[in-house]
Amino acid sequence: MALTPRLELRQSQALVMTPQLQQAIKLLQLSNMELVKYVELELEQNPLLERDEEGRETGEGSTEEPSASTDDFGEAEGTDESAALAAVDVVTDDGPGGAAESDMDVDYDNLWQHDGPSDGEVAADVGSIGSTAFADWGSRGGGGFDGPEGNLEQTLSGAESLRDHLTGQLNMDVEDPVDRVIGVHLMDMLDGAGYLSGDLDAVAERLDCPVRRVEATLQRLQQFDPPGVFARDLAECLALQLRDRNRLDPAMQALLNNLDLLAKRDIPGLVKACGVDVEDLTEMVAEIRALDPKPALAFDHGVAQPVIPDVFMRTQLGGGWLVELNSESLPRVLVDNHYFTRVSRVARNKEEKQYLNEALQSANWLVKSLHQRATTILKVSSEIVRQQEEFFLRGVQYLKPLVLRDIAEAIEMHESTVSRVTSNKYMATPRGIYELKYFFTPSIASSVGGEAHSAESVRHRIKSLTEEESVDKVLSDDKIVEILRAESIEIARRTVAKYRESMGIPSSVQRRREKRVKL
């Protein structure tokens, strides 16, 4: 066969990831907050998209909240595509005389009522009556030289930071300008907990001053509020707080010097090191526990973002469960086909028409992708509720082992799709708010050949056994293995140790020390 260039025509099949398909896959794994940000960006870029702030019904869309009702965990009702469209509507405007001509759409409660005189009345009053009428006009709300009054929120002061709090004390208590410069450098070395992270020798070398002067300045800064700030370790932080309370005696200092023994609950060693009896040692430890090991966290004004559930689940009066999407967390998007028709008529060239067609296609695909996302989340959540019925009825010890394949086969979808849907999604249940990933746990075989046990239920059982221990009968890992095997749970000792450490449960020796003396 000659090696010469030639043209050939071949047919083949291949999966092409179009931009629209990539967008649909991306939307599946976004959380509700990420989805809102993504839709906001699309609203800014696409002129054919608009936000449905009122959630009004149209001929082609529905604002009803999607739900799936299961009666005794039979076939789910309402999981078709028409009911799963939670917050995505496609609207076609009827023209300029549509919503604009309807008086019922006007929000009369939010309209500003102007009770003062008009501009013409003000001019007449000022010209004919004089300053008395002008003062009366200002009192009636018509205006004045002071301008409009500000909102009450504008007079609120901001939260004071740790640096501002320390800077005010530095300016008041330290007069020497060199010591103030040293104090500013030491404030720059504070970490989030208020500890001094850095070497004093480096500060002295940078400022070209003796190290003893830096140490003297540090001692003055350690007297600032909050007590314990500018400490170099935990023992010094606790000592500064005890000194502020006038409770730093030699016995307490000895206890601070042996915090490692306190962590090990070595009571005989602490009694010997501090020179006190067990009763006094218990009181000293209780006093240390009342201190703040991280004094700077009191100035951390960050607000924890609460978890917003994507799915609500509740019981039905007639039995079974009702699973529905949280429509408040889903953005409502509309496609303005009327605007597209009006603008396309005045398009001047081919480029403008192509841009409008691409914008319309992108808007319709976004609506379709949001529709598909809502439907898929509802299907996966409904199947999880059906699979984990015993958990919702009887507790975590009855959580069944579950993998993505089980859900994918039940709803006839791919495992990767289920994995994306369950990422960063939460469901509010009668037992609390759980991430959808929580219900997927590996299985632990049964020792008698029965049903497998969920790893989460086994961890719960291990925690229950350690909490029910007595002082004279602390369970070792081997003993826990024997108890679990007696309950038909086949598990190795190293697995018990791994589960125990993941839950923060100390070893049997450490637990025995803690139970003997409640420190």
Image (spheres, grey):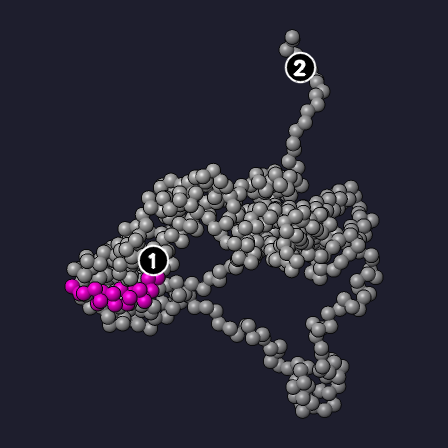
Q: Is residue 292 magenta?
A: yes
> Magenta residues, as a range?
275-294
Lateral position of residue 142 relative to residue 259, left or right: right
User: Where 94 sits versus 120, above or below?
Assistant: above
Residue on which the image places disc 2 = 5
> Helix, strand, or loop for circle 2?
loop
- Looking at the magenta stretch, what is its main secondary structure? helix
Residue on which the image places disc 1 = 189
Q: Is residue 305 magenta?
A: no
Tally of numbered discs: 2
Residue closest to the eye, 104 or 222: 104
Of the image marks 1 and 2, the number of the one nearer the N terminus: 2
- Residue type at mark 1 is Met
Inspect this view and state whether residue 106 appears: yes
In the rendered structure, find residue 248 and report the number of the disc placed on it. none
Give how far apart the Cα atoms at labels 1 and 2 are: 71 Å
Inspect this view and state whether residue 307 appears: no
